[in-house]
Image: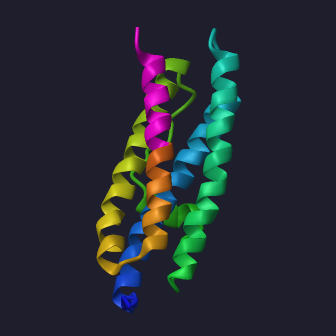
Amino acid sequence: MAQTKVISNEQKKEIAAGLSVLLADTYTLYLKTHNFHWNVTGPMFQTLHLMFETHYNEMALAVDLIAERIRALEQHAPGSYAEFGKLTSVKEAVGVPKAPDMIRQLLEGHEIVIQTARRVFPAAERAGDQATMDLLTQRLQLHEKTAWMLRSLLEG
């Protein structure tokens, strides 16, 4: 019978640190997407308004899953704008950009989240942390699909 690998405290801290960045990136992108949902205008208003709503609702659920995984690893999850601001690479919007710029900024944000999730994966893999690897795989699939959809809107 195969022996179950125990995740060490150091491995938990390393994985949780990476997940904390993922949480900050996701939360910042959530807030940016919600902002754009409220403020989008122009000929693509209805399409973008609904799309952004779908995206921010999904991320609202995702931040909870990420934070709960950090807690399951016996670490504290960041939960303030100050903490998120120190951890995130997603830039806040300045003013209210036009719809095409909103799409570009959200695409950039999703690509950042993808990169962050990929950076966390090796630590989870080394620790044999299947739960975190599963969470990261789900996040990667969602953000890659969303990036593809946003990229498609910018073509032509």
Rendered image quadrant of residue 32: top right
Rendered image quadrant of residue 56: top right
State which region is magenta: 143-156
Question: Where's residue 47, x and y in %?
Answer: 66, 19
Question: Where's residue 46, x and y in %?
Answer: 70, 18
Q: Residue at x 66, y 55 (%)?
A: 61
Question: Where's residue 89, x and y in %?
Answer: 39, 52
Quadrant location, the C terminus? top left
- Name above or below for residue 5 compared with residue 57: below
Residue 40 appears in view: no
Q: Residue at x 44, y 72 (%)?
A: 130
Q: Is residue 145 magenta?
A: yes
Q: Residue furthest front?
A: 1
- Name above or below for residue 111 compared with residue 128: above
Question: Where's residue 107, x and y in %?
Answer: 44, 33
Residue 122 appears in view: yes
Q: Is residue 104 magenta?
A: no
